[in-house]
Amino acid sequence: GINGIWGWGTNKYSDSLGEDKGPKLYSRVASHARNYHNMHWDIPDPDSVPDYENMPGSLNQWWLDWGREYSTWQKNGLGVQASIHFMKSVFPPEEWNKPYEAAYNYGYAFARHFGPTHGNGLVKAMEIGNEPWDYTAAFYQDILLGMAKGAKAADSSMMVLPGAFQADEGSDPGQPGGNYIGANLAEEAAPYLDAINFHTYSYSYDSAGNRIGVPPEHQKSTFNSTKNLIRFRNHNLPEAPIYVTEWGWDSRGAGEECAASECVSEEAQALYAVRGAFKLARLGVDRLFWFFYANSSTCNTLYCRSGLTSSGTDSTGFKLKKSFYAFESMLNLLGES
């Protein structure tokens, strides 16, 4: 899979794009796509209930029509997974008058409209938060339980995932910024969750103490934290699939430089991508979403140069990187194997 956004960096609906941009382009390397679905685009206040039936004109962004966008992804062979994106900086805790009820209502409305059974079938799975680590664990637990129960009440076939958390380092559940899965997932929510959500990158440190990007097989790579999450899953939710919804390497190439210490060469990104996919599959990960579809046009540092193509600026225009060709070759050779 691939991580994308509304319009795929063009500021246009995807149905207006050609073969060399958006869903038509990235369906060459992916069968599913993950969108950062901004909650504040839908509603002005977390206690509001989104009206998806009357798009465009009914959401907080008056022009927005998620149905138009997601249907184009689906028509081009990309199954849609929506990461419901909310942050403390946009929706601080004090603005959630009734966190559980607000989350329940949002989850119900979303699944009822987009779900596979009662809705239009445009969204296969929804995540309750992307990286909701700036809330305390107790606050997030209320949102998770409410939104998961609401989604399942509206459409039991909608796949529901928690936000992305890790299992290799503990955190204080009473402090914002904790991303330890054991603190953020309450046992009460387990019956409403269909998979575990995880982000992982392959980093280590050089002799000077600088963090660097390393091969996926590196003995000291942070990629190995996947094993901790698998052990957590085996103990707590033994039937749940594991989705790695962000992974990748930043690299120079396709006419764009990469300024972070974690950057690797364009060739290394391509080689590590294929080998990383094989390693995660061998470990037992069920689904992968590469971060990101394209380089950023506004920066050249960490996570800005992880694209399978260059940025959409006039000078580069989504030029294919070696990693794009590597994934395309891998999929053409292996298919559904």
Image (spheres, rainbow, N blue to C red):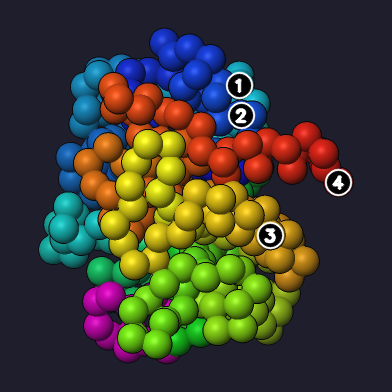
* Residue at 40% in and 49% down: 252
* Residue at 20% in and 61% down: 88
Q: Nearer the viewer, residue 299 or 231?
A: 299
**Circle 4/circle 2 CB separation < 8 Å:** no
- The nearer-to-camera label among 3 and 2 is 3
What residue type is disc 4 on? Ser
Q: Nearer the viewer, residue 107 or 165?
A: 165
Regarding mark 3 in the picture, which secondary structure is present there?
Answer: helix
What residue type is disc 2 on? Ser
What residue type is disc 1 on? Asn
- The nearer-to-camera label among 1 and 2 is 2
Mark 3 or mark 2: whose residue is earlier in sequence:
2
How far is the residue under mark 4 from the one under mark 1? 21 Å
The image position of residue 37, as x and y in percent, is 37, 41
Outermost residue on the left side: it is: 94
Using a 10 Å C-alpha cutoff, classify the residue at mark 1 as few (fewer than 14 neighbours), some (14 to 19) or many (20 or more).
Answer: some
The image position of residue 166, as x and y in percent, is 48, 75
**Circle 3/circle 4 CB separation < 8 Å:** no
Side of 183 where 289 appears, left or right: right
Asked if residue 263 shows in the view, the reply is yes
Compared to 289, does 62 lie above or below? above
What residue type is disc 3 on? Arg
